[in-house]
Image: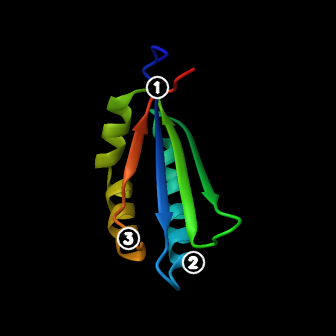
Amino acid sequence: MRNTPEIFIFARLHARPGKQREVHQAMFDVQGPTRKEPGCLSYSAFQSVRDPDEFYIHTCWKDMAAFDHHAELPHTVRFVEVVEPLLDHPFKVTRSARLW
């Protein structure tokens, strides 16, 4: 494993039936403030081409402290509160380090 402080976050969001538009909007609403955070190196959002109810968020942070700070900010807390009831599974993020 490469010795890097950068942290990569992956989140999968699968909308409940009829909630696709609301999940998309919640992702859109949080991306602006997130991208402005000093510790955020990148923020990307994706929608599956095979399942329009399936979304992904991929972010890169300068280090774990930057992501931990992000998780406590009002726009992030609000995003989780809004999106959790729209999903057909528990909301979870995966914290990862780059292998190479």
> Coloring scheme of the render?
rainbow
Whichever of callouts 1 and 3 sits on the residue coming sooner in the sequence is 1
Is 84 left, or right, of 36 in this rendering? left
Of mark 2 and mark 3, the one earlier in the sequence is: 2
Real-space Cα separation, disc 2 to disc 3, in angstroms: 13 Å
Q: Which residue is mark 3?
A: 82
- On screen, residue 71 above or below 98: below
Residue at 32% from the left image edge and 30% from the top image edge: 65
| Circles 1 and 3: CB atoms closer than 8 Å | no
Q: Describe the element under mark 1 as helix, strand or loop.
A: loop
Q: Residue, x 49% and y 15% (percent of image)?
A: 2
Q: Is 74 in front, or is 13?
A: 13
Query: Disc 1 or disc 3, which is closer to the eye?
Result: 1
Secondary structure under tag 2 reads helix
Q: Which mark is residue 15?
A: none
In the foreground, 59 or 100: 100
Residue underneath mark 2: 21
Q: Residue furthest left?
A: 72
Q: CA distance from mark 1 to mark 3?
A: 28 Å
Which residue in the structure is indicated by mark 1? 6
Tell me the quarter of the image containing the C terminus. Answer: top right
Kindly identify the amino acid type of the residue bearing the numbered disc 2: Arg
Residue 55: x percent and y percent? 56, 62
